[in-house]
Structure formats: C-alpha cells, structure tokens
Amino acid sequence: MASRVADSRGAVSLSASSRASSPPAAASPSVLLENPLIDYYSTSAEFYEMVATRHTASSGPPLRRVLEGVDTSYGPVLEIGGGTGRVTEVIASALPQAEIIVAEPSATMRAMLTSRVARNPDLRRRVTVVDGAAQDLPLPEKLSAVVIFGVAGHLTVPERVALWKRLAACLPDGAPIVVELMGVSSPRVIPPVMSLRETIGRQTYEWWIGGEPTEGDAMRFTTTWKVLSDGRTVREVTDSYVWHTFDVARLAAEAGMTSRRITEAGGQAIPEIGVLVK
Ligand SMILES: C[S@@+](CC[C@H](N)C(=O)[O-])C[C@H]1O[C@@H](n2cnc3c(N)ncnc32)[C@H](O)[C@@H]1O
C-alpha cells in the first residue's frame, strides 16, 4: 500500500529547500548569506500545481475549519512556505477580514504565488508576498495565526524550536499554529510509488515518490516526474530532499504548546494536520 506521504501530499514537497554549509557556485547575490538556502523546489516547480490542486482539495476544508473563528484583529496571519498559493487561497477564504503575509523562499514558486495573488482583487488587497525562509524570516510584532504546510520537516529540530519560540512571542494566548504533519512520524522505507497521474493537452504526467531513512530523524525522499507523449516517456525530472520526521506530540513538546491532531473532515480521511495552541 502506498504510504500516506505518497497518497496524499506525496506532495510533501517535490523537493526541498535546505541549508548548506557553503554557497552554491552560481548563487545569486540574494542567497549569498552566511548560511544560504538552496532552492531545490525550482527543479520541479513547473509540475507543482498538479500536486497542490489535489492536495488542497482534501486539506483545504479541515484547514478552513481550524481557522474559522480565529480573531484576526490582533495581527496578520502568517503562512510559511506558501508555495504556489493554493493554501493561501484557503486561508483568505476562511478569514475574509485577515491580512495575510506569505513567505516563500523559492523564486520560481514565489513567481506563481505572486501571479495567483495579483490576479485576484481580494488577495491583492490583503496578501503580502515576501521572500523568506522560516529560519530567519523577519516577523511582525503581532500575529493572529500561523499556517505551515509542507514545510516543517525541511527544518532541523533546533531550527524548529527556534521558530516556535519566535512565533510564540508574536501570538496571543489561544492562537493556533496549523502544521501539516505529512504522515511520516519516524524514518522508514517507502518504496517508490506513482502518486499522481494526470493528462494536460497531449501529455500525461506521472509523479513517482519514494523515501528511505538517512540519519537520526531524517529521511531522503526521491521524486521523479515522467512526462509521457503517445505512451512514451519524453522527459524525466528527478530530485531529492531531506525531510526531518515528526509527529504532533513532538512538535508540541518542542514548542511548549498544547496540540491536537486532525485526521478526518466530513467523514473523509485527510492529510493529517496538527494544531499547536499557544
Ligand atoms: C511542499 S511545498 C508546500 C507549499 C504550500 N505550503 C502548499 O501546501 O501547497 C513546500 C514549500 O516550502 C518552501 N520551503 C522550503 N524550505 C523552506 C524554509 N526553510 N522556510 C520556508 N519555506 C520553505 C518551498 O520553497 C516550497 O514552496
């Protein structure tokens, strides 16, 4: 049976951004930081909408339910790693009065995100897109809620602990940090499985994903997009990324917050969501 990672998000991440010890050779000035972020997401970004569309269809309703009722008068809602903006749309529709800040470090993903925001007058008025990674994202003084979907495993435990602490300082008591759990709470072998198959125009796209334990809490996922035309593979795009596994109890302990886990919505199984409450 396919793993939940491959079944639902498979989408986990087509690839990940991660921190490196030295700058990549062709790094642009904006990434020439002491601890640069490598944008692996661009490799497969052209395919990401297929994953995100399917994923938001299942995780959107429960996210909406968690967010409804949040008092957004306290400050903006922050979305970390907004990707192409599908989740941003869910946040905006669940919280029609909220100002939303979306951070996305991959320029290619951010281009799609900005395009989505710019063509919708309501999003355009309320959503600010910034280039930023969770580890060093400048935060406003106050936030009403935080959404972090498909991102938390790209951070090491110390990076996550630091992030929760910084977020807690901005949130009022009772405010939620909504985290997508991704269904892999500890490293394990996930044999490659076709997680998605879709046809666009004359081409069919297949998304294959598998993973294996590496060190400690980490897994390496490898994903391949196959583009087929007339039944023949005409392109293959492969990438891989490290994902630090976790479950909601672990996140709550890291954050010193209470937590709950949401696994179904309207009787339907959904990609797992964790809610940390300050
Ligand atoms: C799997 S995608 C999820 C996108 C979106 N949240 C969604 O659910 O459709 C992960 C996104 O997180 C971004 N990302 C990766 N590492 C990050 C980091 N350290 N801080 C913030 N975002 C990061 C990637 O560039 C990518 O767009």
Image (cartoon, helix red, strand yellow):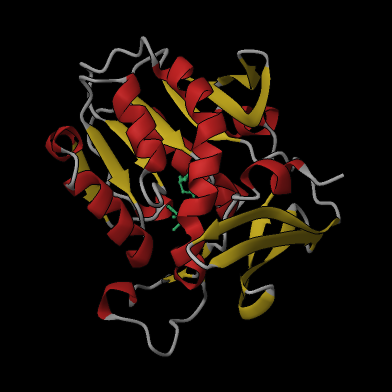
Say whether residue 144 is visible. no
Q: Give 178 or 23, whichever is nearer the viewer.
A: 178
Whether residue 88 is visible: yes
Provide residue 109's location: percent of width, then percent of height: 37, 60
Q: Which residue is drawn at 47% across and 63% down?
A: 201
Place residue 186 in its image quadrant. Answer: top right
Q: Is residue 60 left or right of residue 110?
A: right
Q: How many labels does the image show?
A: 0
Seen in the image, is 20 located left or right of residue 121?
A: right
- Residue 249 placement (x, y as % from top left): 69, 27
Q: In which quarter of the image is residue 228?
A: bottom right
Does 34 sit above or below residue 172? below
- The x and y percentages for residue 237 are 59, 75
Q: Which of 11 and 154 is in front in this view?
A: 11
In this rendering, the answer to whether 251 lies above or below 190 is above
Quarter the N terminus occupies: top right
Q: Is residue 85 above or below residue 27?
A: above
Q: Which residue is drawn at 36% across and 83% down?
A: 27
Q: Which residue is drawn at 49% across and 57% down?
A: 48
Along the line of sight, the residue nearer the viewer: 182 or 205: 205
Residue drawn 52% across and 73% down? 20
| Farthest residue, direction top | 69
Residue 217 image point, x, y percent: 75, 52
